[in-house]
Amino acid sequence: MAVANIEPGNRPPVNKISPGGWIKKNLFSTWYNCILTIVSLWLIYWVVSNLIIWANTQAQWQVLEANWRLFFVGRYPVKSLWRAWVTLGIIVGLGGISWGIFADKAKALFNRRIYIILGIVAATCFAVAIPGGVQSSVILVGMLLLLVAAAIVGKQVGQRFPNISCWLTLLWLLAFGFNVWLLLNGNNVRLDRVSGLMLTIPIAIVSIVLCFPFGVLLALGRQSTLPVIRWLSIAYIELVRGFPLITILFMAQVMLPLVLPSDVRPDRVVRAIAGFTIYSAAYLAENVRGGLQAIPKGQTEAAKALGLNPIYTLGFIILPQALKTVIPSMVGQFIALFKDTSLLAIVGLTDLLGMSQSIIANPKYLGRYGEVYLFVAAIYFMCCYAMSLTSRKLENNQ
């Protein structure tokens, strides 16, 4: 069999197209594409122009300025806000170190895109000076500088200790436990009294962390050759997927306290996390099962031929490939879980949406639905888009 020798310098030609050529090819290639492009541009112009006019002439953004603190930390004691700032600093610092450790093999830690993002974040921090005060703006800019410095330190540490990334999970768990203790200790603040964005994000993070291993075990159980484990997994998945999430949350908040003794009754936040975990694990199990079915049987047979036992085969060969395949669907499920936390307002917990409804109910801000809900939607979009960007980075690095 003849093999063609291709020299490294003889690469296939790259077809470069000018911006005008790209527009003609993709937007005005046919007569109906021309009509669709014109109609779409007109609709975009109409929506954006009316939104700008409303934002500059009719919207009353004072509702955001007066309630800036309530959106983020709810009714957390003002004298203890330093605890919230320290918690944010720990998260930002550890996030920067993790970023630097995972980028230890990259040529440059910062590129043009990162500089643009950092510039936008810095401008946003300065913009906070109007509603949040100059002190808050200075602290946020300091957090941004802490992120950059921690990333630089993390890259140096990652290059010196290549196996340090194995300890990041433990560091994040320890930091999470310390932050919870710091926020609740010494303030007489019960867990179910935490509100605003400070309640939404922890519930989403804990639910995501808990539902992932639970969903993987359910997917493996549904693929098991043991009838009892397989049928129990199938029953759980199909039963949970047959109920709406709000039903599970109501059962966790209302029905569970009726059947448990008062001395072992879990907190309302813990019950909400359990409801989200139970619900999301069933859907995540089906996503992971799709990835397991995509792996050819020859992978398992090759592992057996090499003498690997089933646990090693599953942990080092099958699961890594399956999870890589279903990263987009898993992250989509995590994003859906984050947005579903808005249902907490229905079951009595004051999350970000619940706090927004409380603000709108104030007679001083009646009718300010557009301003408040647009701001809340922007927060949800930024968090979900950050998760989407992270998933794409994971796909590219695999």
Image (spheres, rainbow, N blue to C red):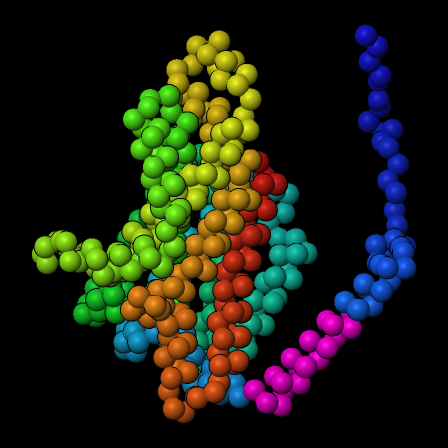
| Among the 4 quarters of the image, the one containing residue 139 | bottom left
Placement of the C terminus among the 4 image quadrants: top right
**Visible residue check, residue 367:** yes
Question: Which is more toward the observer, 307 or 112?
Answer: 307
Residue 361, image x and y in percent? 38, 84
> Residue 388: image x %, image y %?
56, 52
* Quadrant occupied by the N terminus: top right
**Left or right: 200, with 325 as reference point:** left
Most prominent secondary structure in the magenta stretch? helix
As drawn, is 298 to the left or to the right of 258? Answer: right
Question: What's the residue at 44%, 88% (across, down)?
Answer: 366
Which residue sits at x=49%, y=54%?
335
Give the total of numbered labels.
0
Residue 170 vertical placement versus 115 (above, below): above
Residue 130 at x, y = what percent? 51, 83
Q: In the displayed structure, would residue 309 be above or below residue 387?
A: above
For residue 396, above or below residue 383: above
Q: Return the x and y of residue 80 as percentages of the image width and height.
A: 28, 73
Tell me where the magenta segment starts and ends, as one range: 41-59
